[in-house]
Image: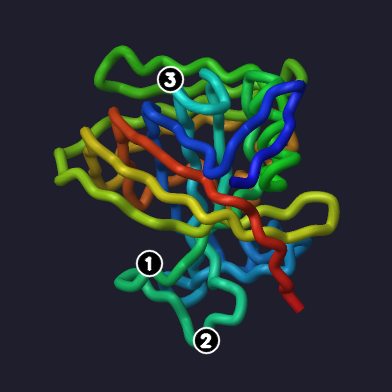
Amino acid sequence: MASHLIQGRTVGMPVRVEDAEVCSAFYTVRADAARAVIAYSGLDVAEVFPGKAVCVLLFVDYREGDLDTYHEFGMAFLIRRPGAKGTVGLRDLREAGMFVHWLPVDQRFTLEAGRRIWGFPKELADIELRLGSPYKRCVLRKDGRLVLDVLIRPGLPVPAAMAPLDAYTHLEGVTRRVPWSVRAGGTRIRPGGALIRLGNHPIAKELSELGLPKRALFTSTVSRASMTFGEAEEVRTV
């Protein structure tokens, strides 16, 4: 079985998360603007509507897992899988992958593990999560500057589901595919459902150039999630 040595600890593969709470907001943004943001990766966004891509903002409370407990914020885009032909519309999003553009965390062990094992663009940040009430809130600061303050209102319950996904990363000139599966329980979804305030950090400016703040396409909250992350594979994008 493959393993990695991180800060003197052996991390076996696949990496497992036993319990996490996940909140997400999905936004439609101009496809040309999104392409400009992720151009460095060599990947292409999925146009779920003509001229429109999807930007995903998410925050996670990892409560039990191989990489310990920590908070995480993610900025990602739905992409066409490398080599895929044709377009990816709203009805066939399972054909899309998720490119992780930025992934701040608040603990050093998961920071090093994420970067070394999978090439996730993890950075240290101050992530304040308020998940004890029906309204889920994340306040994210980096280098003392506010990046964003986002509030998500849970919607209607939907059945539990398990979904295999492909996450894509790019770090130090290398693009990778990360097999990722999620089992979600306690899931709620609603149209719209997010309030967002941007700060003065460069990522906030990037989000502003994508058209945020605006009404979310939809939001989701998952009160009980388990995940597995497989070994990363290098991807040729040319």
Q: Amino acid at mark 3?
A: Arg
The answer to whether one can see residue 92 in this image is yes
- Picture coordinates of residue 218, whole percent (x, y): 32, 48
Name the residue beneath numbered marker 2.
85
Q: Are marks 1 and 2 in contact (CB under 8 Å)?
A: no
The answer to whether one can see residue 206 in this image is no
Find residue 219 and report its image quarter. top left
- Picture coordinates of residue 131, whole percent (x, y): 36, 18
Name the residue beneath numbered marker 3.
63
At numbered mark 2, what does the secondary structure look like: helix, strand or loop?
Answer: loop
**Residue 60 vertical placement versus 8 (above, below):** below
Looking at the image, tell me whether mark 1 or mark 2 is earlier in sequence order.
Answer: 2
**Residue 192 vertical placement versus 233 (above, below):** above
Determine the CA span between mark 1 and mark 2. 14 Å
| Residue at x 65%, y 40% (from the top left corner) | 3
Looking at the image, tell me whether mark 1 or mark 3 is earlier in sequence order.
Answer: 3
At numbered mark 3, what does the secondary structure look like: helix, strand or loop?
Answer: strand
Front of the two marks 2 and 3? 3
| Residue at x 73%, y 73% (from the top left corner) | 236
Q: Are marks 2 and 3 in contact (CB under 8 Å)?
A: no
Furthest-front residue in this view: 1
Q: Which mark is residue 94?
A: 1
Q: Amino acid at mark 2?
A: Lys
Taking 165 as reference, is 112 left or right?
right
| Residue at x 59%, y 46% (from the top left corner) | 1
At numbered mark 1, what does the secondary structure look like: helix, strand or loop?
Answer: helix
Q: Quadrant of the C terminus?
A: bottom right
